[in-house]
Image: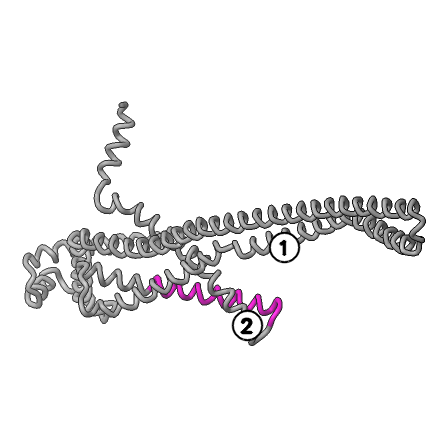
């Protein structure tokens, strides 16, 4: 390790106090909490928007203007809801941290309101996420429409195949009817002629039976193809349902994570700022205390702003006597001496600035 690398590590390690450890985490968590609000609005939109669109289309106006109104109302409500949720939970977090993370009677109101609005937010996000992920109904409708079209096409195709045999059978039946009529009119003593007619009828009957067998085969083939389409449709519907379940589970996890990020970011900001204030209170309160005392001393010196040009400014000894008389400060003379030194330096600086301006 070279000296430069060690110097970088030394500076990095030396800043590992409370503020150094948590400043970055506080910054990112708080920033991501707004992303969580956007995710919550996005998911809840798919619950609120369809309901508003339906109500507006029935009771107010339909078409494009109904869609626009539903979009505006849904997003406006959700944005206001998320802002109110942040402020309510922030107020609860602030009081909760300040009370040492103990639920007192005064905190029950904030806690109840915060839990109620967070629960409602969870409900809107989760149901909206479920609606967003539930695409199987649309996919199933498309699949069933496709299957119906394929079934119609198959019916036409196989009907054309059967038509050849059905036309042939109808022609053969017509011939047989004619042969039977002729046979009935042929004298009995014309045995050879009658036998020829009967043989033709029998031959045609066999052809008709053969054609009918082919027609039955075509019907069976059509029935088999339709069953295959139904089986494929059932598999598609089952697959869509499985995909819905996976998507719903995934979106619900995202919605829960978004709500957790909001709660965590807002609460951590209040916890971090409060602890940072407590840790630095002693150090900085002394500075503010000294500023307040200096401000009081200035009011003595300038008589609360009533001192005008030509009036005599109070002396240092008189100021010490006034401070000793009206306060119970220890080492009040030391405080006055420090004030006078800084006051003289400040007056001298203002005089120099004034001369430069002139």
Colour mode of the rendering? one colour
* Total numbered badges shown on the rendered structure: 2
Q: Earlier in the sequence, mark 2 or mark 1?
A: 2
Q: Is residue 77 magenta?
A: yes
Q: Secondary structure at mark 2?
A: helix
Q: CA distance from mark 2 to mark 1?
A: 30 Å
Q: Secondary structure at mark 1?
A: helix
Q: Is residue 241 above or below residue 319?
A: above
Q: Is residue 196 above or below residue 297?
A: above
Q: Is residue 214 above or below residue 132?
A: above
Q: Nearer the viewer, residue 96 or 182?
A: 182
Considering every residue shown, the one lying at the far front of the view is 189
- Residue 145: mark: 1
Where does residue 280 sit, x and y in percent of width and height? Answer: 19, 52
Q: Residue at x 28, y 56 (%)?
A: 267
Q: Nearer the viewer, residue 98 or 144?
A: 144
Q: Residues within 10 Å of mark 1 (few under 14, many from 20)?
A: few
Q: From where the camera sits, is residue 225 visible?
A: yes
User: Bounds of the magenta span?
Assistant: 62-87
Q: Residue at x 32, y 53 (%)?
A: 265
């Amino acid at each position: 390790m070279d000296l430069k690398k060690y110097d970088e590590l030394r500076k990095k390690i030396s800043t590992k106090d409370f503020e150094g450890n948590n400043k970055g985490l506080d910054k990112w968590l708080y920033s991501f909490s707004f992303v969580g609000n956007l995710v919550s609005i996005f998911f809840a939109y798919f619950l609120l928007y369809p309901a508003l669109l339906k109500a507006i289309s029935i009771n107010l106006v339909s078409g494009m203007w109904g869609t626009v109104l539903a979009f505006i109302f849904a997003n406006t409500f959700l944005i206001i809801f998320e802002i109110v949720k942040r402020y309510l939970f922030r107020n609860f977090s602030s009081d909760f941290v300040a009370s040492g993370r103990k639920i007192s009677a005064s905190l029950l109101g904030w806690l109840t309101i915060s839990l109620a609005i967070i629960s409602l937010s969870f409900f809107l996000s989760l149901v909206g996420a479920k609606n967003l992920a539930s695409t199987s109904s649309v996919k199933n409708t498309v699949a069933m429409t496709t299957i119906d079209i394929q079934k119609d096409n198959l019916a036409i195709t196989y009907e054309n195949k059967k038509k050849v045999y059905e036309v042939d059978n109808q022609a053969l039946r017509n011939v047989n009817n004619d042969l039977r009529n002729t046979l009935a009119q042929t004298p009995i003593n014309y045995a050879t002629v009658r036998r020829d007619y009967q043989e033709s009828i029998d031959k045609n009957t066999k052809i008709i039976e053969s054609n009918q067998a082919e027609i039955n085969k075509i019907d069976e083939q059509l029935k088999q193809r339709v069953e295959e389409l139904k089986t494929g449709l059932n598999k598609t519907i089952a697959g869509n349902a499985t995909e819905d379940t996976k998507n719903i589970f995934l979106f619900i996890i995202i919605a829960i994570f978004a709500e957790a990020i909001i709660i965590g970011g807002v609460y951590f900001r209040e916890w971090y700022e409060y602890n940072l204030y407590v840790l630095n209170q002693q150090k900085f309160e002394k500075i503010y205390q000294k500023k307040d005392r200096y401000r009081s001393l200035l009011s003595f010196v300038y008589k609360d702003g009533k001192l005008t040009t030509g009036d005599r400014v109070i002396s240092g000894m008189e100021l010490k006597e006034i401070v000793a008389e009206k306060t119970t400060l220890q080492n009040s003379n030391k405080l006055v001496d420090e004030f006078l030194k800084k006051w003289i330096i400040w007056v001298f600086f203002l005089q120099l600035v004034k001369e430069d301006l002139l």
